[in-house]
Image (cartoon, rainbow, N blue to C red):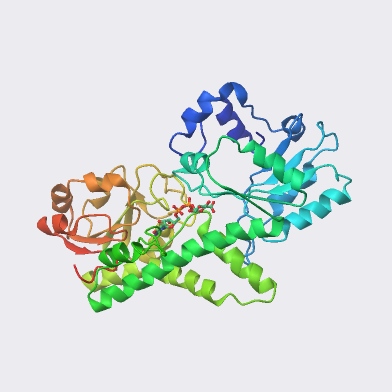
Amino acid sequence: MRDIVAEKIETLERGEVPIYEPGLAELLERNRPRLSYTLDVGEAIRDAQFLYICVGTPPTASGDADLSAVWTVVDELPRDFDGERPIVVMKSTVPVGTGTAVRAALDARGFERVGYVSNPEFTAEGTAIDDFMHPDRTVIGSFRPDDGDAVERLHEGIDGPIVRMDVASAEMVKLASNAFLVTRISFINEIANVCEVTGADVLRVAEAVGLDHRLGPHFLRAGIGFGGSCFPKDSLALKQLAANSGYHFQLLSAVIEVNELQKRRVVNKLKKHLGSLRGKRVALLGLAFKPNTDDMREAPSIVLAARLAAEGAVVSGWDPIADGRAALTGVHIAGSALEALDGADAAVVVTEWPELREVDWAEAGARMENRLMVDGRNTLDPEELRAHGFEYEGIGRGGE
Ligand code: UGA
């Protein structure tokens, strides 16, 4: 494994994992004799049959995917490949057409004997190992069938269907899957918003809607919007890819806009109860973009903290794993949920960490200046909170 950040390589060599991902440290430890880490690309590709590209493709200022890391890797491939037909396997999420462009670049450098396969990643943070071992599907897109065959053979022992196709379609499967998932989230969030004004409860609604086998129960959790390093950037990248190709992807534009508004709705919920937020103390519970990760990228907590600060609120925050200090300037980061709630006028559940269900809400309430809970993930029991004297607001719980 090769990376350009020396610190990451040193951490991995020590047997530590630079990110929080349940089970990963144990998995790396079990396979330690078979793993090596280096900064040197020549060393990494020596004898390699498969060259996986797993770099970030963050959004540029225009919202397109930034492929500079992909191109650096491709450009750095040294001339002296061993082995008969090494295959470059693209794991990174890239715009449709990237494979064709990389193929052309490889050919231009005289690397015709190097294969190219698109094999998009569908694992989610926090469940990455299980998702990898038991995938819903493995997608393999290739220009030449024998390159696809080689990558398919590599997946023997991993249960789940393998779907073969051309490179462009494989690239699109990834973007379309994420776009579909975010559409479901924004859809249920809008249903939740309508539930609030009509007196329905989105939890009951989503449960029953999800029982329709054509719709299914997943990704119907209403909340304060999706975040993370994938959904926001991939939905924007697909929108821009379409626009650059002359197509206005109206539905996806709405999905993205709904998500932006959803994060901000919390501010209005707080104002409904507290009036002006100037000088009010608000505690954000959970800062990572979702539970079981320390990832703060595009976390709704960042937008929320900034909006609250703009309203003049004094913001504290707590997360069991994520270190919010860099992303949340001006927010007091507390060592525990109770500490974050000390003297608070309101609490907001931003991330549904299971730890929050274990909080002693009687004690929390006693420490707060005012007992207001905005449960942005519908994760707490409204009855329990109300029993402890809280005013409780969920998302889409008009019937509560
Ligand atoms: C997502 C996809 O689920 C993976 O399949 C994909 O491989 C990955 O992106 C990627 O493109 O690399 P991830 O970002 O790790 O994985 O996390 P998710 O569990 O999908 O959650 C993303 C966001 O959606 C979170 O902020 C979560 O709170 C939110 N969400 C999810 C909802 O608001 N409601 C839901 O019902 C589900």
Nearest the viewer among 44 and 184 is: 184
Residue 233 spot, x, y in % from top left: 56, 60
Give me the residue at 76% from left, 43% from top. Answer: 146
Give me the residue at 15% from left, 60% from top. Answer: 390
Taking the image as shown, residue 33 lies to the left or right of residue 130, namely right
Nearest the viewer among 162 and 34 is: 162
Residue 381 spot, x, y in % from top left: 20, 55
Give me the residue at 89% from left, 45% from top. Answer: 110
Q: How many marks?
A: 0
Residue 73 visible? The answer is no
Residue 56 visible? The answer is yes
Nearest the viewer among 66 and 254 is: 254
Residue 294 spot, x, y in % from top left: 44, 44
Residue 84 spot, x, y in % from top left: 82, 34
Nearest the viewer among 364 and 383 is: 383
Classify 389 as above or below 74. below
User: Outermost residue toward the top?
Assistant: 33
The quadrant holding residue 331 is bottom left
Give me the residue at 71% from left, 56% from top. Answer: 166
Q: Quadrant of the C terminus?
A: bottom left
Q: Quadrant of the N terminus?
A: top right
The quadrant holding residue 284 is bottom left
Taking the image as shown, residue 54 lies to the left or right of residue 337, namely right
